[in-house]
Amino acid sequence: MTTEIPLDNPRRHTIVLAATAKGACLCRGIVRRQLADWGVDSSFGEPFHSALLIVAELAANAITHGRVPGRGFELHISLTTTVRRGATLRIEVSDCRGDRLPVLPSARVTDGQSGRGLVLIDALADRWGTALRDPSAKTVWAELDLADARCLADAR
């Protein structure tokens, strides 16, 4: 496995939020503000809006499928530049249910009110996956490649 070495110091932000509807709602606003601080805004077009949708879906999944009473979920975002990919935005949402790993639906999504979140993430993200965390938690992550790396130069 080859690990890319960042060309700069990655910008990072981590916060723990309540595993409630309000916590999930706050999550998207926090990401929007942090991205703006890094110079990533609506002028980036699709990647910016995709990031907000991915965050909303991952947070909703964390409070719906990963909730443990009395425990929150963690949001971590980072923005780095590497030789191979240029600027990459990584979104991670961790919850306390490592026994419930997400699975991309293999069949056509029905007309039900749920079941589309991972399909959206799969369509919007350049890469996504899961990782187990100790002791019994998981992280679901997604990465977006940003064609325009000006955000990293402007945020220095």
Image (tube, rainbow, N blue to C red):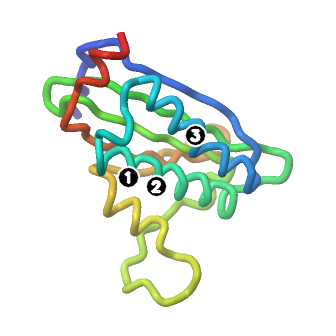
Which kind of residue does numbered mark 2 sit on? Answer: Leu
Task: Tell whether 144 sits left or right of 140.
Answer: left
Q: What label sits on residue 53 in the rendered view? A: 2
C-alpha gap between disc 2 and disc 1: 5 Å
Q: Quadrant of the C terminus?
A: top left
- Furthest residue in direction top, as rendered: 156
| Residue 147: x %, y % from top left | 19, 37
Is disc 3 surrounded by few (<14), some (14 to 19) or many (20+) residues within 10 Å? Answer: some
Residue at 41% x, 24% y is: 38
Q: What label sits on residue 133 in the rendered view? A: 3
Pointer 1: what residue? Answer: 50
Chain-order first, disc 3 or disc 2: 2
Task: Tell whether 42 sits left or right of 27.
Answer: left
Q: Nearer the viewer, mark 3 or mark 1?
A: 1
Which kind of residue does numbered mark 3 sit on? Answer: Arg
Residue at 59% x, 36% y is: 30
SS category of the residue bearing label 2? helix
